[in-house]
Amino acid sequence: MHVADASPPIAGASSPITGASPRLYNEDLAPAQVRRWGAFSIFNVWTSDVHSLWGYYLAASLFLLCGSFVNFVLAIGAGSLVIYFLMTMVGVAGVRTGVPFPVLARSSFGTFGANGPALIRGLVACFWYGAQTAAASGALVALLIRWPGMLEFHQTSHMLGHSTLQVICYVLVWAAQLLIIQRGMETVRRFQDWAGPAVWLMMLVLAIYLLVKSGRFSFGQEIPQDVLIQATRDAGITTPPGSVATLFAVAATWITYFAALYLNFCDFSRYATSERALRIGNLWGLPVNLLAFCLVAGVTTTAAFHVYGEVLLHPDQISAKFDSLFLAVLAALTFVVATLGINVVANFVSAAFDFSNAAPRHVDFKRGGYVAATIALVLYPWSPWETGAAHFVNFIGSTMGPIFGIMMVDYYLIRRTQLNVPDLYRENGEFRFNGGWHGKAFVALFVGMVFSSILPTFTSILPAWWGTYGWFFGVLIGGASYWLLRMGDG
C-alpha cells in the first residue's frame, strides 16, 4: 500500500513565504514542504480515528439496527462511500495547498475571520479530548479493579469528585498522549503506523474468542427487539430495526459521526506524498476499513449476547466479564491504544493547529497542543462530558456542517481549486476582505446554523427526524447561501 512517488508541488507556495505577517504565519502553519505520509499512513489515520470505545459502540449499535447482513452492507456501505467522497474532497485541498484547516478557512472566512470556525473546532476538540481520555482511563480502571486490593482502593479513596484510582489513570493516559505529540506530526505518523494494525489484530483476537465461546456466527436477529431498542437508544435512532427509515438514519448517523474530521483532515493530507497516495489510503481506510470494523464490532457484540445474555455495546463491559486475565489485559491495552489514536487524530492535532492559528507569534503546534491538553485536564473534575453539557457541545459542533459547505463551495466552485496560497499569510492580500473578515461567509454560516443547530435544538418547528440529518442541511444550506451571496462578486 505504500506509495513512494514524489511530493506534489504546492500551488503558488514557496518557503519561506515573502511578505508573510507574523500575525498569520509560523513554521507549523506554513505550507508543508516535507511529504512522507504514504497511502499506509493515510490508511492508519482512519484506523486510529474509528477504533475507539465510542466508535465501537456506535458501529455495534448501527450494525444491530440494520437487522440483517444485506441491510448492513447497504446502509453502512453507502454511508462509507459518502465519507470517502467527502474526505477525499477536503484531502485533495490539503495535498494541493499544503496548509492546515484554519489556514485553508482563510480563503472563505478571511485571514482573521478564519479564527471563528477554527476556535469552534478547537473547543469541541478539547471537550472530546477529555471525554476520550476519560474513556481510555476507564478501561484501565475496569482492568485494575479485578484485584481485590485495587477494588477496595477504588471504592474508599476519592479526590476531585472521582475515585483516586480514576484520577491516577486519567493523568497517566493524559500524559501518554503528550509524549506522542510533543515530537510533532512525524511522530504521530509513526505511532499510527504501529497502532493501527496492532488494534486490528487485537480486535480480531477478541472477536474469534467470543465466536468460539458462543459457538455461532450471527448478525443479531436473535436479540429481542425491545431489548435491542433499549440498548441502542443513545445512538439517536428511534425507528424499528431493519426498516427503510432506520437504514437511512443509520447511513446518516455514520456519515455525521465524521463531521469534525471533514474540516481538519487536511491537517494530515497536507503531508501526503501525492493525491494518488491520498486516494488509495482513503479507499482502504474508509469504505473497506469501515465496513470491516462495523462487521467485527457487530458480530462480536452478537457473540457476547449469546455468551453473557446481555447486549454489551461497550467493549470494556465485555472485557470485564472475561475469565482469562490475559485476554482482559489484552482488551484493556487495545482500548487504551485505540482511544489514544482517535484523540491524537481527531482532537489533539486539530486543537493544536486551531489555537496556533489564533496567535501564531506566541503559539506554535506544540504549545497549541499543550493548551488543548491543559483545558481537558482542568475540565476533568467536573467531567462535563458526563452531563447535559454534551448537548451544548453537540449544538456547537453541528455548526461544522455549514463551515464545511462554505469551505468546499469556496474551494471547488468559486476558486476552481486555484488558490493564492502565499496570500493566505498576508494581511493585505486577496483574503483581507473587510479588515480580515469576510461578512458573506459569516452570514452564510448563520443561515446554515439556523437549520442545522438552532431550530432543531430550541424549537419544535421542524419535524423530529430533522435532527438526524441536521449536519446535511447545514452543509447544503450554508454552502448554497455562500454561493448565492458570492454570485455578485467580480
Image (cartoon, grey):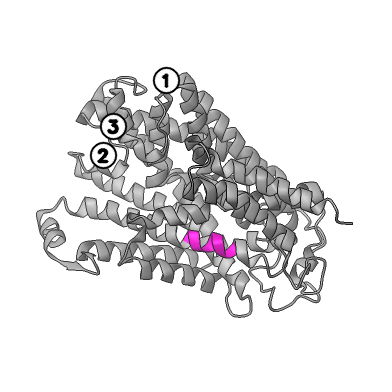
Three-letter residue code for mark 3: Tyr
Q: Nearer the viewer, residue 432 or 3?
A: 432
Q: Image quarter for residue 1?
A: top right
Image quadrant occupied by the C terminus: bottom right
The residue that label 1 is drawn on is 68
Query: Helix or strand or loop: what does disc 1 sit on?
Result: loop
Crowd around label 3: few <14 · some 14–19 · many ≥20 (10 Å): some
Q: Image quarter for residue 435?
A: bottom right
- Inter-mark Cα distance, 3 to 2: 12 Å
Could you say which disc has been placed on residue 318 in the image? 2
Label 2 or label 1, whichever comes before in sequence order: 1
Query: Helix or strand or loop: what does disc 2 sit on?
Result: helix
Circles 2 and 1 in contact, beta carbons < 8 Å: no
Could you say which disc has been placed on residue 209 in the image? 3
Nearer the viewer's eye, disc 2 or disc 1? 1
Q: Is residue 289 above or below residue 65?
A: below
